Each structure stands twice: as C-alpha cells, then as structure tokens.
Amino acid sequence: MPGWSSKLTRPVAIKGGPVLRTLNDARAFVIDRLPEEDQDRVSWQRTAELLLAAAEGSAEIETATQQLERALFLQAKWLLPED
C-alpha cells in the first residue's frame, strides 16, 4: 500500500508557500493552510478524495498530482515548473 509518505509524481510549488513533495505534504496543505471556504470548492473536494484514494492505493498518484495542480491553477496558486 502506498501510504501518505509516497511521493507525488513531481514536486508542486505553491505561490508564497511550500513545495509539496509527498501525499502527506499535499494533505497537510489542504487541511492546515487552505482556507475553509476554499476547501469547500468542488476542485478541492475532488483533490482530497484523490489524495486519500492514492494513499490507500485505490487511485494513481499521478491522478492525484494532476488534480492538485488543477485546483491550485484555478486559484492561481500554482507555480509552473521551470524547464
């Protein structure tokens, strides 16, 4: 089983915040740093569902990483990776 310590498919940088590297980093960001009104948005609800499913092994970590990036993008909080 993957578990919360599993790495995201790629690091996800937050504007003015941390770089999320694991499922647990993403979980902690959603629970501890995301305002409650944002947590209630459909995009963040879906993110939370996929993070939990990925930690339990019933969803791909790539799918959870992509949804996390989408939710951040919708709120202009995602720093695009520098290539």
Image: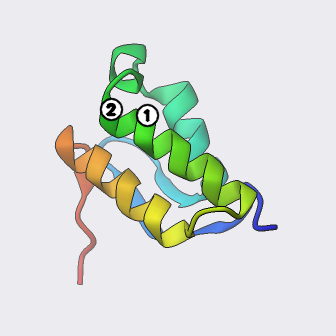
Color style of the picture: rainbow
Amino acid carrying label 1: it is: Gln
- Could you say where residue 79 lies in the image, as x and y percent from the top left? 25, 57
Residue located at (32% from left, 39% from top): 43
The furthest residue to the top: 37
Residue 45 lies left or right of residue 50; in this view the side is left
In the rendered image of this protein, does residue 70 appear above or below residue 62?
A: above
Query: Residue 66's image quarter?
Result: bottom left
The foreground one among 73 and 60 is 60
Residue located at (63% from left, 53% from top): 53
- Could you say where residue 54 lies in the image, as x and y percent from the top left? 62, 59
Residue 32 lies left or right of residue 17; in this view the side is right
- Could you say where residue 24 lies in the image, as x and y percent from the top left? 66, 49
Mark 1 is surrounded, within 10 Å at the Cα level, by few (under 14), some (14 to 19) or many (20 or more) other residues, namely some
Q: CA distance from mark 1 to mark 2?
A: 5 Å
Residues at circles 1 and 2 in contact by the CB criterion of under 8 Å: yes
- Local secondary structure at mark 1: helix
The tag on residue 78 is: none
Residue 1 lies left or right of residue 28; in this view the side is right
- Local secondary structure at mark 2: helix
Q: Where does the N terminus fall, quadrant-wise?
A: bottom right
Residue located at (60% from left, 38% from top): 28
Query: Residue 56's image quarter?
Result: bottom right
Q: Where does the C terminus fall, quadrant-wise?
A: bottom left
Query: Residue 41's image quarter?
Result: top left
Q: Which residue is mark 2?
A: 42
- Could you say where residue 76 lies in the image, as x and y percent from the top left? 17, 43
Amino acid carrying label 2: it is: Val
Q: Which residue is mark 1?
A: 45
In the rendered image of this protein, does residue 7 appear above or below residue 29?
A: below
Count all numbered tags in the image, as a single digit. Answer: 2
Residue 8 lies left or right of residue 14; in this view the side is right
